[in-house]
Image (spheres, rainbow, N blue to C red):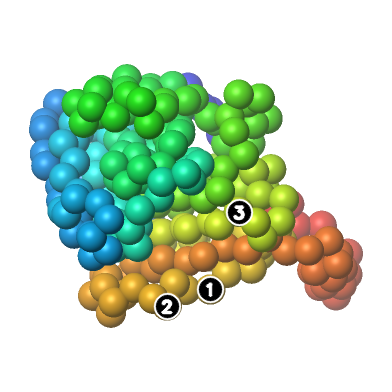
């Protein structure tokens, strides 16, 4: 059984440890060396309706965990929404925001954005909101995957998620939260991730029960980040009949395997 207290302590000592499993070395072992640093990131816009480039000042700090660092998929998703242009009038919800980067870009583009994560990351998100003078459009909220959606979170027009696939025990929790937030195809879900481990396939096996997806095809940067094993997807909620068909298919496979029920 997973000991969460031990896991949290290990995360504190080495925030990047979940990116190293077995013989798959994604990043070398190292202490949390990113401590209370300031960076500046910029993303061009092309519509002429908002200032270009979008410039975001960002505090990064690995002390509360690896979410306090700017990761590649977050930059890819930030660049994509900046390229798409204005988001005025849109309600945006970012999952696993970490530093809040993607939601900050959305706020800069005119959206009302809620950036969400676990409690240890709320302070750095709030700091980044204030540092970019986006208090009137970007709001910080605690949201733990797998738990009921808070009543004061509005129904989003667009859900953004970047670099959320890295900790295997959280896979079913993330899928549940996505399913709870999205009831039909009226909500657009942009999901960007970097393939790091074979275990990532399990996440998509779970996701397939609730969503279908396709790669975003209108991003001219796609060939560049694809070479870095980064993929940008658009998720669509399955209809009830599709979910029943998939569940029936899973049961048939389990029966063929001798009646074993494989837990998610």
When asked about the image quadrant of residue 69, the answer is: top left
- Name the residue rendered at 57%, 69% in the picture: 213
In the rendered image, residue 187, in percent from the top left (x then y), is placed at: 60, 54
- Name the residue rendered at 47%, 66% in the picture: 233
Taking depth in this image into account, of 111 and 22 the one nearest to the observer is 111
Q: Where is 93 relative to 205, above or below?
A: above
Report helix, strand or loop for mark 1: strand
Q: Where is 31 relative to 6, above or below?
A: below
> Which residue is disc 2 drawn over?
217
Distance (Cα) linking label 3 and label 2: 18 Å
Q: Which label's residue is closer to the chain start, 3 or 1? A: 3
Contact (CB < 8 A) between labels 1 and 2?
A: yes
In the rendered image, residue 229, in percent from the top left (x then y), is placed at: 32, 70
> Which residue is disc 1 drawn over?
214
Question: Crowdedness of circle 1 by 10 Å Cα count: few (<14), some, many (20+)?
Answer: few
> Which residue is disc 3 drawn over?
187
Q: Can residue 71 be seen in the rendering of this structure?
A: yes
């Amino acid at each position: 059984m997973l000991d969460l207290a031990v896991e949290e302590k290990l995360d504190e000592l080495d925030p990047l440890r979940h990116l190293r499993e077995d013989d798959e070395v994604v990043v070398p072992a190292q202490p949390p060396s990113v401590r209370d640093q300031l960076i500046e990131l910029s993303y061009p816009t092309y519509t002429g309706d908002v200032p270009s480039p979008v410039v975001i000042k960002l505090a990064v700090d690995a002390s509360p965990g690896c979410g306090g660092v700017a990761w590649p998929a977050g930059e890819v998703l930030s660049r994509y929404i900046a390229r798409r242009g204005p988001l005025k009038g849109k309600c945006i919800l970012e999952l696993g925001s970490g530093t809040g980067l993607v939601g900050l870009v959305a706020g800069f583009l005119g959206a009302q954005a809620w950036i969400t994560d676990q409690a240890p990351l709320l302070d750095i998100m709030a700091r980044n909101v204030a540092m970019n003078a986006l208090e009137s459009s970007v709001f910080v909220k605690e949201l733990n995957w797998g738990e009921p959606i808070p009543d004061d979170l509005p129904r989003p027009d667009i859900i953004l998620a970047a670099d959320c696939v890295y900790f295997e025990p959280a896979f079913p929790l993330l899928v549940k939260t996505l399913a709870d937030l999205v009831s039909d195809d009226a909500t657009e879900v942009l999901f960007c991730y970097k393939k790091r481990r074979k275990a990532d396939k399990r996440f998509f096996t779970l996701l397939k029960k609730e969503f279908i997806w396709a790669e975003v095809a209108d991003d001219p940067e796609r060939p560049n980040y694809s070479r870095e094993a980064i993929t940008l997807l658009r998720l669509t909620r399955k209809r009830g009949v599709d979910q029943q068909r998939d569940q029936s298919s899973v049961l048939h496979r389990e029966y063929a395997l001798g009646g074993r029920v494989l837990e998610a």
